[in-house]
Amino acid sequence: MTLTVFLWVLVAVLITAGLSWAYMVAQRLNRLHIRTDSARAQLQAALDRRAAVCAALYPDVRELAAHTEAIPLTPERFEDRARQEAELSRAIAKAHEEYSPQIVDANARLQLAHRFYNDAVRSTRQLRTRPLVRALRLGGTAALPEYFEFVEDTVLDERPQ
């Protein structure tokens, strides 16, 4: 009789431990998704700020900057936005020999926001792609976040010679 009680207690402890682990992982994933969303909003703000600064300082790229800024930074439009940002960077690099401090500052902020966002995505994907987490669907219905690929040094590297 005592062996049976011991086994039931052991099973109850194991089930409780498993459920506690699953709950903690689900909470961690929720926090990571919030962090990713926040980082994406910061990246959007940095991209928009850079486009606005470009439009204000360089009238010849104002239309391109406005078009770039109009593209929302959603996972479905990441490629479009990255392509437009690269085009804007090339246009500025071709047209202007020297960059104002405002552009340099906007680019520095953009680089930081880009790194923070991709770091948040890496952390989220790292946890979400574990086999047990996927099998138990602890990520819920949230979409797996995508990296934002943007060549950060385009503005600084493509100056006219």
Image (tube, rainbow, N blue to C red):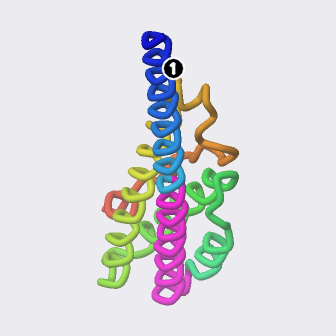
Residue 9 rendering spot, x and y as whole percentages:
46, 24
| Residue position for label 1 | 8
Of residues 4 and 31, the one drawn nearer to the viewer in this rendering: 4
Look at the picture and state if 83 lies above or below 101: above
Outermost residue, front direction? 1
Local secondary structure at mark 1 = helix
Q: How many tags in the picture? A: 1
Q: Residue at x 59, y 61 (%)?
A: 84
Residue type pointed to by label 1: Trp
Q: Residue at x 61, y 25 (%)?
A: 135
Residue 128 rendering spot, x and y as whole percentages:
52, 37
Q: Which residues are magenta?
A: 33-60
Of residues 155 and 123, the one drawn nearer to the viewer in this rendering: 123
Report whether 3 appears left or right of 83.
Answer: left
Look at the picture and state if 112 lies above or below 15: below
Report whether 156 appears left or right of 41.
Answer: left
Q: Residue at x 50, y 57 (%)?
A: 36
Residue 145 rendering spot, x and y as whole percentages:
57, 47
Quick one: quadrant of the C terminus? Answer: bottom left
Q: Residue at x 50, y 89 (%)?
A: 56
